């Protein structure tokens, strides 16, 4: 079966270097012409769409501090980064920063769950990138969409998150490529959007006496990108159980988890919504 990227001609996504043909043909032309794609050139089509970008290593480590706030569409800053990090991958700050939400589909598990969700809520065709282990589906940001786990193998990249964009190269050597061209972005289906806010069902109930608020705070503060909202949601649920048993006050639980969530990089609006729903669920179940 032919690779999806080769099914139709693509226009190379670097302005001033437009070559019609497959991605492989375009790369060959660039190689023969001696044109190396710099970080600045790779960033140009994205910043022209109003997206904010920043440099990242092949193993997905940001090369600048406070990357979500520092991500920019300023050509001068991007030019300076290109000189400082000539071989950097390009990452896009998702969510409100760029007006995009990305579904990160990981492997067959993620693909199967996407198909399962699609049976319940029709998912429109969206610009798609082939990543090292799956696919990235690009949608228009819906304003309050949080980052987190939608289903096993499906992560939502929105507020306080990022996505690696073509023509970046993964540490495995895989090159990120558009398999469905970057065009008009569809809206994230409302049914999926609402699912992001539902408190996750806690399948294993720890004895409430074994729950320590400081452990919950530490877990939230150290949560990795892509797991922060889900970690906060679970911690809020557990803290809600402590409140229900009279082991901690609502205000103490809220303040402790709120500060931890700020420390791990979540936005205030997302924190408030997740805390409110998680604490409520823990107190009532």
Image (cartoon, rainbow, N blue to C red):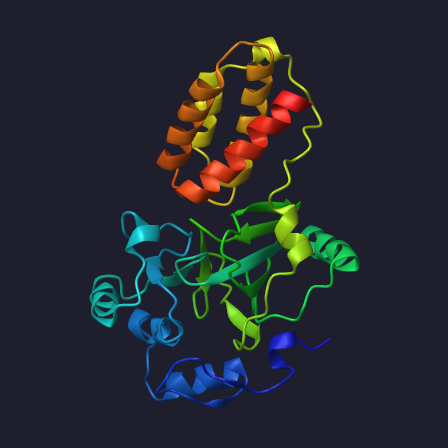
The quarter in which the N terminus is drawn is: bottom right
**In percent of the image, x 32 and y 69: which residue is there?**
39
The quarter in which the C terminus is drawn is: top right
Q: How many marks?
A: 0
Q: Nearer the viewer, residue 184 or 128?
A: 184
- Residue 163, image x, y percentages: 46, 58
Q: Nearer the viewer, residue 107 or 247?
A: 247
- Residue 80, image x, y percentages: 20, 66
Q: Is residue 47 left or right of residue 167?
A: left
Q: Is residue 247 above or below residue 125?
A: above
Q: Is residue 107 above or below residue 250?
A: below
Q: Is residue 250 visible?
A: yes
Q: Is residue 153 visible?
A: no
Q: Quadrant of residue 42?
A: bottom left
- Residue 222, image x, y percentages: 42, 32
Q: Is residue 218 above or below residue 79?
A: above
Q: Is residue 93 left or right of residue 199?
A: left
- Residue 134, image x, y percentages: 61, 59
**In percent of the image, x 65 and y 60: which residue is there?**
189
Q: Is residue 84 left or right of residue 230?
A: left
**In percent of the image, x 64 and y 17: which residue is there?**
206
Q: Nearer the viewer, residue 21 or 144?
A: 144
């Amino acid at each position: 079966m032919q690779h999806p990227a080769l099914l139709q001609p693509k226009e190379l996504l670097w302005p001033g270097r437009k070559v019609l043909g497959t991605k492989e043909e375009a790369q060959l032309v660039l190689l023969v012409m001696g044109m190396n794609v710099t970080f600045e050139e790779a960033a140009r089509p994205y910043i022209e769409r109003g997206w904010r970008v920043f440099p990242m290593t092949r193993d997905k480590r940001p090369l600048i501090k406070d990357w979500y706030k520092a991500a920019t569409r300023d050509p001068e800053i991007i030019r300076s980064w290109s000189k400082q990090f000539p071989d950097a991958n390009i990452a896009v700050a998702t969510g409100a920063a760029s007006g995009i939400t990305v579904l990160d589909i990981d492997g067959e598990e993620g693909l199967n769950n996407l198909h399962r969700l699609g049976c319940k809520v029709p998912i429109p065709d969206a610009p798609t990138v082939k990543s090292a282990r799956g696919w990235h589906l690009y949608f228009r940001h819906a304003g309050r969409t949080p980052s987190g786990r939608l289903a096993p193998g499906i992560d939502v990249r929105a507020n306080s998150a990022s996505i690696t964009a073509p023509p970046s190269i993964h540490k495995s050597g895989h090159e990120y490529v558009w398999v469905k061209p970057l065009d008009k972005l569809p809206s994230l289906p409302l049914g999926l959007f609402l699912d992001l806010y539902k408190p996750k069902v806690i399948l294993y109930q720890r004895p409430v006496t074994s729950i320590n608020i400081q452990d919950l705070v530490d877990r939230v503060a150290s949560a990795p990108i892509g797991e922060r909202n889900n970690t906060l949601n679970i911690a809020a649920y557990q803290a809600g159980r402590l409140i229900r048993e009279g082991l901690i006050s609502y205000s103490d639980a809220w303040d402790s988890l709120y500060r931890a969530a700020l420390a791990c990089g979540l936005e205030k609006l997302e924190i408030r919504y997740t805390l409110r729903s998680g604490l409520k669920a823990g107190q009532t179940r």
